[in-house]
Amino acid sequence: MHSSARIFPRPNLPPAQSLRADTYNMYCLMPTDERPTTNDASPDELWMEEALRCAQRALEIGEVPVGAVVVRSGQIVGRGWNRNITDSDSTAHAEIVALRQAGATVGNHRLSDCDLFVTIEPCAMCSGAMVHARIKRLVYGSDDPKAGAVHSMMQVVNHPQLNHKIEVRCGVSAGRSAELLQTFFKNRR
């Protein structure tokens, strides 16, 4: 099953193209069974395709299939996929790898004009790294009810006491992202 996200506002609310975590409950993101093509896909869906390719690379090396890309001015400046086992590094999550590469590419640890696309809701470590990097926008696929730190388990991204706010859009290609993870864990059992 392939999916992309559509934003369906609740009654009497204006439509939105993206969400902030503090307004997450104001909108409902409903997955559809449509696979984007280059003719009808939004830029978010096309960048998420790249993140899904990165997740596939993680799967091929026996890692949990999570992928991420950092985009600046319509160009990928960082790619990452989980490498925890391969690198014997507990911090080698897809988002961290992509953020490190993006920082090296642009020559700055601040990535305030960059968007991060990741196949699953980031954990606390990755969410904290995004806040420190000053990522402008986060787009992710499926929620992570066990470790998600955007809104599922805790709210690190856009915590009310932090001074940096990240625009958030969730549910883009959520079905495909979740399917990759489910297949991986099913095969490990």
Image (spheres, rainbow, N blue to C red):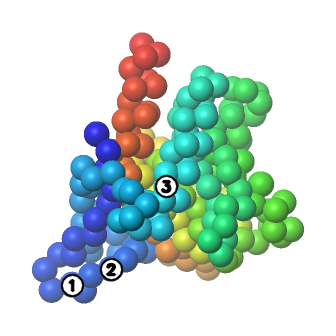
Left or right: where does residue 12 sit relative to residue 7? left
Mark 2 vs mark 1, CA separation in Å: 9 Å
Q: Name which residue lies at 34% across and 69% down.
A: 24
Asked if marks 3 and 2 touch (Cβ < 8 Å), the reply is: no
Dot 2 amino acid type: Ala
**Residue 73 in picture, x, y percent from top left:** 65, 75
Q: Secondary structure at mark 2?
A: loop
What is the number of the mark on residue 48?
A: 3
Circle 2/circle 1 CB separation < 8 Å: yes
Local crowd size for mark 1, using a 10 Å CA cut-off: few (<14), some (14–19), many (≥20)? few
Q: In x, y percent, where is residue 52?
A: 51, 45
Give 52 or 130, whichever is nearer the viewer.
Answer: 52
Q: Which mark is residue 13?
A: 1
Q: Say what secondary structure mark 1 lies in.
A: loop
Q: Nearer the viewer, mark 1 or mark 3?
A: 3
Residue depicted at x 72% and y 62%: 77
Residue under label 2, please give it: 16
The kind of residue on which mark 1 rests is Leu
User: Left or right: 74 with respect to 15?
Assistant: right
Q: Amino acid at mark 3?
A: Met
